[in-house]
Structure formats: C-alpha cells, structure tokens
Amino acid sequence: MNPQQKPAAKPLLTVVCPQVQGIGFDVFRKWIAKGIEFAKERANGSWNGRSLVLLFQEMIVDTRWDTPHEEMVTEVEAVRKILPANVHVFFSAAQLDENGVPANMGWLVSNEGKKHQPKRTMGRGDERDIDCHYTDSKMKMLWKMRANKLENEKTHFLSFILRSGIEVECRVCADVRAEPIGFNLEKIALVAADGLPQTNIGSIALARKIMIVNDEGKCLDGTFGGGLRYKSMAVEKEKILVEKTSDFHSITILE
C-alpha cells in the first residue's frame, strides 16, 4: 500500500430493510435468511462477523391484537434460533402484552436473546385497529396508562451495543417523538415505521449519529414512506453506502 494512501474504511454497521408486509412467521423467517444472504453477497465474501441489523417495517407479521404474549414468545424464539452471531432483527407486531393489554410490540432479537417493549405513542393506525377489534375504550385507556408509566420511569428504548461501543437504539414509528430522547451523536437510531411523516423525525434525527427508517406506507402529510429513509448529523456522506433492489434496501455505515 502506498504510504500516503489511507487504509480502506471498515464497515461499522449494515442495516438491511426488507420491502415486505403482512406475512406469517414461516415466511418472515425466510425473509430473514434471504436478507442475511443479501448482505453477505454485497460484502464480496469478506463478511468476517460484521454487525448486521434486519430492520423490518412496522406491524410486519400478520398477527392479531388478541394474540397471546406466550404465543409471540414461542414464535420469536424460533426466529432467535436461526440467527448467526452479530445479526439482530427488529420488528413490531400486534399482540397482547403480559398483562393482557393490546400492544404494538417492538421485538429486538439476536442469537444471544430477545427483548420486547410496547410502542408508547398510539398512532392513528393503532387507534383505528383497536377500535375495530374492541367494543369499548377500556383497552385504549390501558395502553395510555402503560405508556405514561414507561415515560414517567424514563424507561430507555430497546438497544444493543456494537463491538465499537456505539449504542444502537430501536423505536417503533411515532415513538421517534417519545421521551427520553436526549442528545447523543454517538448513538444510532433505527425505526420500524408505517406512514411516518418526515416532519416527525426532526428532533431525534438532530440528536443522533444517524437515524435510519424502514417505512411501508403513505405518510399522513401526503409524502410516501418509500422504504429506506435516513438522516445523519455525524456521519460523512462518503461513509454512507446505500443500495436499493425490489426486495431489499440497505445502508452501510463506514467507520
């Protein structure tokens, strides 16, 4: 190597965003396997344990608002067992929480374990679906009580730590506005969304190293989600590599 030539930058994190909606868990696991192969192919055989996240869109799996939590745990455990090292999956699904309250539940899964946390902000889609499924307003009241408890306790969002020490936090759609946010340009934010208006991502995007969204649908402000969106405050443009195919959108952040 020429002494004046800089060494090639190493990938810090690759995020693959599958462009799929409303599937069962059997198909979901197949998309995970396809997404991992997609990332490895783009690495030209030099994968070497890179950090990868499969970031799905909001409400990706075809579950119900009355799906028992125990049933979801079983399905997610089956997902965990197929994941190789250094691969995380983040998605959300309709279900009941441990107390029998409807939740748009965020799940963060790796081969080392699984974490879950309910979405706090009740979006219009959540409210509409719950109204269709339940005949009284009790369930919406219980959702809001749960959200208030999480916010009052300043409960942090689901996250994991890269080998570099950088934290990757995961939120579901409108929770981009939920506290705690804080200011941390060393933290990466990932968002599973469906119709998240561009105007809603401002505060957290300004407070993170980079924010990455996989969005399914038309936003409330009339703009189109269009799969992968990102905004960065602390990553140089030449260190962000983006590729889009019909099945996958991907973004790699270089060190």
Image (cartoon, rainbow, N blue to C red):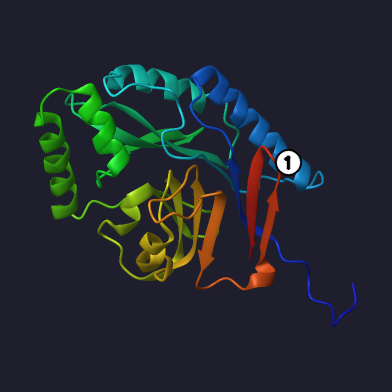
Residue under label 1: 40
Q: Circle 1: is it few (<14), some (14-19), or many (20+) Cα within 10 Å? A: some
Query: Does 57 sit above or below residue 62?
Result: below
**Residue 226 in the image: above or below residue 133:** below
Depth check: give the residue in front, 81 or 245.
245
- Front residue of 81/246: it is 246
Q: Residue at x 59, y 31 (%)?
A: 32
Question: Residue pushed farthest bottom?
Answer: 4
The answer to whether residue 158 is seen in the rendering is no
In the image: residue 192, left or right of residue 240: left
Could you say whether the residue bearing mark 1 is in a helix, strand or loop? helix
| Residue at the spot 13% in from the left edge and 46% down from the top edge | 149
Residue type beneath disc 1: Lys
| Residue 152 against residue 23 in the figure, above or below | below
Residue at 50 percent of width and 25 percent of height: 79
The N terminus lies in quadrant? bottom right
Residue 253 spot, x, y in % from top left = 62, 60
Q: At which x and y percent is residue 155?
A: 23, 51
The reply to whether residue 228 is visible in this rendering is: yes
Left or right, residue 179 beside residue 82: left
Residue 204, image x, y percentages: 37, 64
